[in-house]
Amino acid sequence: MIKWTNRFLVIALLIVGLIIVGICFVAVPITDIMNIQPATQGDLTPLERFMLSGEGNVAFAFSWSTQALVLPRLAKSERSGYWATALSYGVVAPFFVATGGVMALAMFVKTGVYESDPTTMLSTLSTPAFALLSLLLVAFANIGTQGTGSYVNCMIVKSGMPKVSYKLMVWIAMVYVSLLTIWGGVEEYFGSFISLAAYIQGPIIGMIVVDYFILRKRKLDLCSAYFLEGHDAYEFTKGFNLVGLSCVFISLLVAVLFVYNPVTAQIQSPIFLITTGSGFTALFGGLLYWLASLSPLKRYMIKDRDTITI
């Protein structure tokens, strides 16, 4: 069901996106769109503005990292998994982002106001009927995207905590998304929401790189990886790696207090101008994990050295 829903919606949205780009260039001369000067905050330097934009991009990439890493595993072959991921994140997603940007700029030229509601933009640039059709399509696309996202996220949690009921995780995801929908503040705090998600996933990404390439030297115990009976090299304290959790918490805390606060959008340190906030959490989380491996904690972190199979 999810597969066929996405196949239909992606193709339909691509067609609508191409039509929208054409409508924008017909409604507003392309030269006017190209001549728009970006809105800037007077109290920020050009580098700070650039890095704030970079933070949004890095955080967005980190927040989608788990989906990008897990979805290819659902493909029937390595080739199809590679091309599906490359095309979706390298072509389809950038196209929709660019389409939204062009539409917002065209709307600004037309009305002098930056607008984020696609229905309002299309009703101004085109016709109310086309705006309604697009609204319905976007609504169904959001439902399909949320269904796919919930499925993937629940599957990720299930792979790390196999004893937890999958149905329970689905119900938790449903309640969580429903509360966010009722609250209605996701759009207003979207940047903060994405950065906070990246602040959690950033250290995890850093630790994965350090753990696999530096500590384990790309060698794993497959029997433990598949939870075969009698093989528990990857089982930690009641299912939680306390060293890893500590690295995530410390990285998040240090980044918020001393590098960049995503809630207030406040730059706390010149380090942000080099790494961004989310990038800092990945680097710092990986560094903390590596330092922990130099201590007696290494025995807790790496228990598969005598049972490596690949």
Image (cartoon, grey):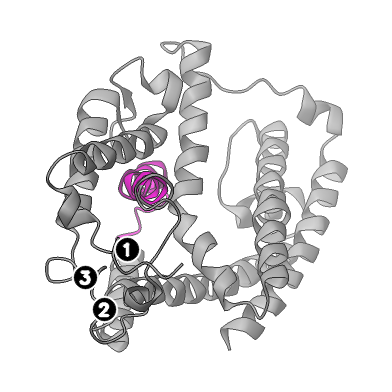
Magenta segment: does it hold 197? yes
Q: Position of residue 79 (x, y in %)?
A: 72, 69
Which image quadrant is residue 33 in?
Answer: top right
Of marks 1 and 2, which one's residue comes earlier in the chain?
Answer: 1
Q: Position of residue 260 (x, y in %)?
A: 31, 28
Per the rendered image, the range of residues in magenta is 183-210
Q: Secondary structure at mark 2?
A: loop
Between the C-alphas of marks 1 and 2, the distance is: 40 Å
Which image quadrant is residue 39 in?
Answer: top right
Q: Is 303 placed left or right of 81 in the picture?
A: left
Q: Is residue 194 above or below residue 162?
A: above
User: Circle 2 is placed at which residue position?
Assistant: 231
User: Circle 1 is placed at which residue position?
Assistant: 180
Q: Amino acid at mark 2?
A: His
Front disc: 1 or 2:
2
Between the C-alphas of marks 2 and 3, the distance is: 9 Å
Badge 2 crowding class, 10 Å Cα cut-off, few under 14, some 14 to 19, many 20 or more, is some
Please tell me which residue is depicted at 37% across the width and 34% down the height of the picture: 283
Please tell me which residue is depicted at 72% across the width and 41% down the height of the picture: 102
Q: Amino acid at mark 3?
A: Glu
Q: Position of residue 12 (x, y in %)?
A: 75, 71
Please tell me which residue is depicted at 72% across the width and 32% down the height of the picture: 109
Of marks 1 and 3, which one's residue comes earlier in the chain?
Answer: 1
Q: Is 289 placed left or right of 33 in the picture?
A: left
Q: Position of residue 147 (x, y in %)?
A: 48, 77
Badge 1 crowding class, 10 Å Cα cut-off, few under 14, some 14 to 19, many 20 or more, is few
Give the main secondary structure, helix, strand or loop, of the magenta stretch: helix
In front here: 144 or 31? 144
Q: Secondary structure at mark 1?
A: helix
Q: Amino acid at mark 1?
A: Leu
Res. 237 mark:
none
User: Circle 3 is placed at which residue position?
Assistant: 235
